[in-house]
Amino acid sequence: FECNLKGSMLQAATNGYTDIVELLVERIEGDDSDDETLQFDDAAQSLIQEAVVVAAEHGHCAVVQQLMPLVMGFHRLTYLSSYYPTARSVLDAAAGNGHLEVVKFMVQHAQQYRYAQQFSIWASVDTLEHALTGGHLEVANFLIDGSGIFWNLKRAFVVAVEMELATVAERIADVFTRRFHGDNLFAELAHSGDLEAVKYLYNTRCKDERSVGKAFASAANGGHADVVEFLLGIGLISSEAFDKAFEHACSGFETTGVVTYLYNMKRASLKAINRAFAAANDVAVLKLLDENENISDESVTVAFERNTNSRFNGKHEILEFLASKPCVPSELIDEAFVAAATEGNAESVNLLRGDSRVSDTAMGEAFVHAVVANKQNVLELMYEE
């Protein structure tokens, strides 16, 4: 290996040579220490952080125990924000390579120093998934049952099903129900579109009408046509469950395909269609229902008011469509106009300022709100008036 300080430190960490690690730590100590606490410059800190991860990767718990106090000391003023990523890397490296002793130490360390909850903020691939994909079931079982940390159990279940680890999948399903106070794993998986995991749960434990109906509605809201079709094909979807799923689909985002599929089945009741219209978050869904159904004035009004109070990107397109409906009362047009001015939504202000339903009072209020909020783009439009 490269015979320099960095190479020596990493080689010692790789092989678990604690005595050599101790000597090298003393060697790289900075010269600005005024007390008994070791001081390290940025390069030295980076090297020690790299070394502790390497030690974890190779299962050398003694070296991890030796270096973690130093890493912790680097960030005593910015504790969680700076220290936690290194701790996570250490834990992930140990779990992904099947080193249970290191994993147990790091979990205990996290609990002792009160940062264990940070591991419940899931990374794109969390520690439990690293253990599963590495085939380290002893580590995975400890993390599931004995760590007391809220891992991404839903994702872990998907991985277990993909890897045909039935015993692990069953354990995860049981722990999920206990840990998340009865939250429905079946419905959660349906919402995220994990078809194979949905099929597994249906075949092993979720064959009742209520569970299938709830998962069906979740899949519809998530816009996952393949899961919707699978659950519908089971034959347990009641009229009430279909109506609920249709409403959930219409209230989702980027779900037009599923909405169209369900609508074309002609199973949704008129009441459900009107409720779905009022809850829709996509102008394409509104237009589909408006062009093919007799939508009530009340549903149009509710949809307009909802849109005024919403904060999503498709807001203006829905406003433009609904504002063309004469049944929308002037007071709601006023509210939408003032809200648009306050938010600095010049496109919506420009649309509504020529609407005869906008009152003089709303014009004045919108101007004041735009001034207070310093919405220059809106003020320029209103000056043109």
Image: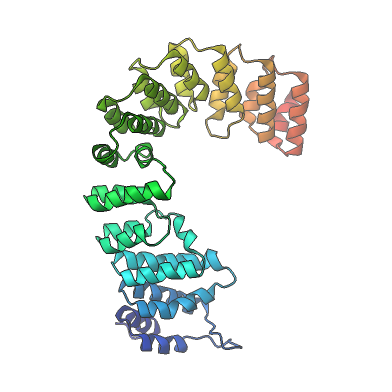
Q: Indicate the position of residue 304 as horizontal and vertical percent values.
A: 58, 22
Q: Is residue 41 above or below residue 229?
A: below
Question: Which of the 4 image quadrants contains residue 184?
Answer: top left
Q: Is residue 312 found left or right of 216 in the rendered image?
A: right
Q: Is residue 272 above or below residue 140?
A: above
Residue drawn at point x = 41 percent, y = 90 percent:
23
Image label count: 0
Q: Quadrant of the C terminus?
A: top right
Q: Is residue 58 found left or right of 82 in the rendered image?
A: left
- In this orientation, does residue 132 appear? yes
Residue drawn at point x = 52 percent, y = 21 percent:
278
Compare residues 286 and 267 and report the one nearer the observer.
267
- In this orientation, does residue 155 appear? no
Q: Indicate the position of residue 332 as horizontal and vertical percent values.
A: 66, 20
- Can you name the residue that lies furthest to the left here? 164
Question: Which of the 4 image quadrants contains residue 320?
Answer: top right
Colour approach in the figure:
rainbow
Q: Indicate the position of residue 66 as horizontal and vertical percent values.
A: 42, 81
Question: Which of the 4 image quadrants contains residue 345?
Answer: top right
Residue drawn at point x = 28 percent, y = 33 percent:
207
Residue drawn at point x = 36 percent, y = 26 percent:
258
Q: Quadrant of the N terminus?
A: bottom left
